[in-house]
Image: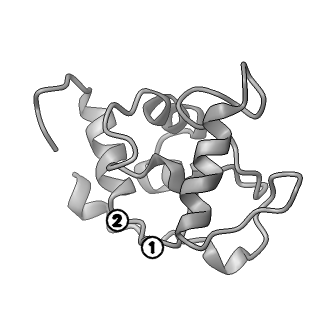
Amino acid sequence: MSKARKVTEYQERVYALLQQIPEGRITTYAAMSTALNSSPRAIGGALRNNPFAPDIPCHRCIASTGFIGGFKGDWEKVPSGQNQESKRKLLEDEGVLFDARGYLIDKKALWDEFDVKKVS
């Protein structure tokens, strides 16, 4: 990760965790927060401010309900929904599909096998 962009130590840990998620798999804000002994909202805040997207794949994190969730600070149609459409496209290109309401179709895509030792 380039140090040219300022990120906090916490963000670095979150981004290191994101890099462990294999292409074609997704995790949840809750799973990431459990791995880092944090909160889903804190994870969301770090992802919202990810200056390395999509190289650091924050698009691979969804809500624990299976809802696709936000991307780059937008949630669903706020303000335009463009970012959520971008997230859906990135995930579809990796084989992760959502129904018309934005919910994960195949729960087998969920992944939570984080190696926390690699981010400490």
- Does 106 sit above or below residue 35? below
Q: Is residue 99 left or right of residue 20?
A: right
Disc 1 and disc 2 in contact, CB within 8 angstroms: yes
Vertical arrangement, residue 38 with respect to residue 120, above or below: above
Most foreground residue, 110 or 77:
77
Can you give x and y, in whole percent of width and height, for residue 28 in the image?
Answer: 60, 55
Residue 96, position as x, y percentages in the image: 63, 69
Find numbered disc 1 in the image and state the secondary structure of the residue it sits on.
Answer: loop
Displayed quadrant of residue 20: bottom left
- Residue 51 in the image: above or below residue 26: above
Provide residue 39's location: percent of width, then percent of height. 55, 38
Residue appearing at x 33%, y 31% in the figure: 51
Label whose residue precedes the other's in the sequence (1 or 2): 2
Quadrant the N terminus occupies:
top left
Between marks 1 and 2 in the image, the one whose residue lies nearer the viewer: 2
Amino acid type assigned to the residue bearing label 1 in the image = Glu
Question: In the figure, is residue 20 to the left or right of 61?
Answer: left
Q: Amino acid at mark 2?
A: Gln
- The residue identified by callout 2 is 20
The Cα atoms of the two marked residues, 1 and 2, are separated by: 8 Å
Q: Nearer the viewer, residue 90 or 66?
A: 90
Is residue 31 visible to the viewer in this orientation of the structure? no
Instruction: Tell me the tag on residue 113.
Output: 1
Q: Residue at x 80, y 52 (%)?
A: 102
Percent x, y of residue 29: 58, 48
Task: Name the residue: 58% across, 37% down.
Answer: 71
